[in-house]
Image (spheres, rainbow, N blue to C red):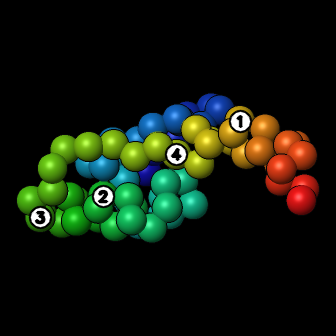
Amino acid sequence: MVTENAGPLTAQLSSLEATDLTLVGGKAASLGRLVRAGFSVPAGFALTTRFFEPWLVHICASAEWRL
């Protein structure tokens, strides 16, 4: 499982577990699970939900969002 004080912005696929679903979403968590099970998955990383928080705040505050 990936942990940090304020939460990470990215997470390596090889460090993800099924319990990281809310951190990175289903597809990335599943890829992490495959890596840990020994399947051949290209090295990579996932953007976490924390990465997207600033954009969500901005989008939800915009006039276009409230239409």
Left or right of 49? Residue 57 is: right
Task: Looking at the image, tell me whether mark 2 or mark 3 is earlier in sequence order.
Answer: 2
- Which numbered circle lies on residue 54? 1
Front residue of 61/10: it is: 61
Query: Which residue is depicted at the point 37% across and 53% down?
Result: 16
Q: Which residue is mark 4?
A: 48
Whole-angstrom CA distance, mark 2 to mark 1, is 25 Å
Query: Which residue is depicted at the point 11% across and 64% down?
Result: 39
Q: Which residue is mark 3?
A: 39
Label 2 secondary element: helix
Task: Looking at the image, tell me whether mark 2 or mark 1 is earlier in sequence order.
Answer: 2
Front residue of 54/9: it is: 54
Image spot of residue 19 (x, y percent) = 48, 64
Query: Which residue is depicted at the point 43% across and 51% down?
Result: 1
Task: Count neighbours of disc 2 (C-alpha within 10 A) and say few if under 14, some if 14 to 19, many if 20 or more.
Answer: many
Left or right of 5? Residue 54 is: right
Q: Quadrant of residue 31?
A: bottom left
Left or right of 51? Residue 20 is: left
Whole-angstrom CA distance, mark 3 to mark 1, is 34 Å
User: Mark 2 is on which residue type?
Assistant: Gly
User: Mark 1 is on which residue type?
Assistant: Pro
Whole-angstrom CA distance, mark 4 to mark 2, is 13 Å
Image spot of residue 47 (x, y percent) = 47, 43
Label 3 secondary element: loop
